[in-house]
Amino acid sequence: MKIIQVVSSLDFGGLEKMVIQLTERLNQTGSECSIVCLEKEGGLVNEALRKNIQVDVFSKKDGFDMDLIWNLKKYFQREEADIVHTHNFAPLIYASTAAKLAGVPCMNTRHGRADKKAPWIFWALNKKIAAVSNDAKEQLLKNNRIKSEKVKVVYNGIDIQSMRADLQPNEKAQLRQSLGIKADSFVIGNIGRLVREKDQATLLKAFRKISQRTKNVELLIVGDGPLKSNLLKLAKELDIQGSVKFAGFREDIAQMLQIMDVFVLSSIMEGISLTVLEAMAAGLPVVATKVGGNPEIISEGKTGFLVPLGYPERIESAVKRIMADPRLGRSLGEAGRLRVQENSQLEHMVSVYREIYDEIKSEKG
């Protein structure tokens, strides 16, 4: 079965990482799967190429690009695609239309809350629609004209084996030292793009409160993005720049998680956060905002703590509970690890998508 995954780009992000993992696993298990980027390659393209994934880029023009639809149509026909799988809004519009013209069935995955409404016709072009959480499905149906029976919740999964980076104490110390983190510091960690949606500004404000009342605590932010300079400036204004480490984009996420003591996600919107799942798989206690699909993967007081968005003091309170009670932190981390092992394996996600592809193929024609 030839499946083409269509994304806007392979920029750094959870959606893009999930598509690469899905494509790799499909290729390993008998399908022929490739990725199309509508706009540009993006920073994760090298990861895809290292996994021997075919990536084709169409360099979409500004505004509405009618030529893109015709180019995609010819591409799908030339590649003899069996299914076109689009992800989020722009791929839905362009690739679903092109797939219809090419006579190829298609489906779409909604990776978070639907900010943009799409005309009903584009949803009608899709045989199936996946949503990464019940929250995403609810918002999708609320804001768009879609038959509910067409939408299936498919939770994101992660490669748990890749998160098992059991560093020795000396290796942890060396990694901390390379980042300028003290050996005896309690490390609060965050991984994500430095964009408005991730709201690291609120995390910085929470950290200021924590550091004013606690010694030997540091904040490690892993990731890059357009708001980096703003966040650096805010850290300076809050007089915490000496205790905040901006590590930039890193590929050694499993190792970075090993040197954290608690993981904090301060997002204002989420689908199903891959970084939260990875932190849980690494055995870290998690503090996350109560948005999107977060309450569907974090059980309050059992695998982590949920806090309202935009409230630094609530993040402070949750983190300090974990800092004050190491047994609680270990309990939350272990429960989170078990939850991911039982419910968020990458293999399960891939098998569900394969079932959907089989259903679509059987309905073809």
Image: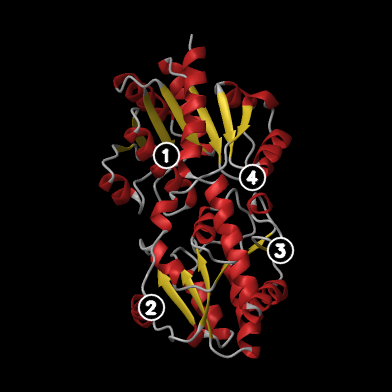
Q: Nearer the viewer, mark 3 or mark 2?
A: 2
Residue 144 visible somewhere in the drawing: yes
Tag 2 residue: 169
Q: What residue type is labelled 3?
A: Gly
Q: Tell me how far mark 4 sits from mark 1, CA to CA.
A: 21 Å
- Residues 262 and 364: in front is 262
Instruction: Name the secondary structure under disc 4.
Output: loop
The correct choice, above or below, for 190 with respect to 298 in the image is: below
Residue hosting label 1: 22
Q: Which one is in front in this view, the residue at disc 2 or the one at disc 4? A: 2
The earlier-in-sequence mark between 2 and 4 is 4
For label 3, count other residues whose C-alpha is less than 10 Å away and answer few (under 14), some (14-19) or many (20+). Answer: few
Question: What's the distance in space between the residues labelled 2 and 4, CA to CA?
Answer: 41 Å
Q: Which colour scheme is used?
A: secondary structure
User: Looking at the image, do the residues carrying marks 3 and 2 touch, with CB atoms under 8 Å apart?
Assistant: no
Q: Would you name the residue on which mark 4 appears?
A: 113
Q: Mark 3 points at which residue?
A: 301
Single out the mark in the foreground, 4 or 1: 1
Pinpoint residue 92: horizontal percent, then vertical percent.
52, 32
Residue at image location 41% in from the left, 62% down from the top: 254
Q: In which quarter of the image is the N terminus?
A: top left
Q: Which of marks 3 and 4 is nearer the N terminus?
A: 4
- Residue 308 lies left or right of residue 224; in this view the side is right
Q: What element carries label 2?
A: helix
Asked which quadrant contains residue 199, the reply is bottom right
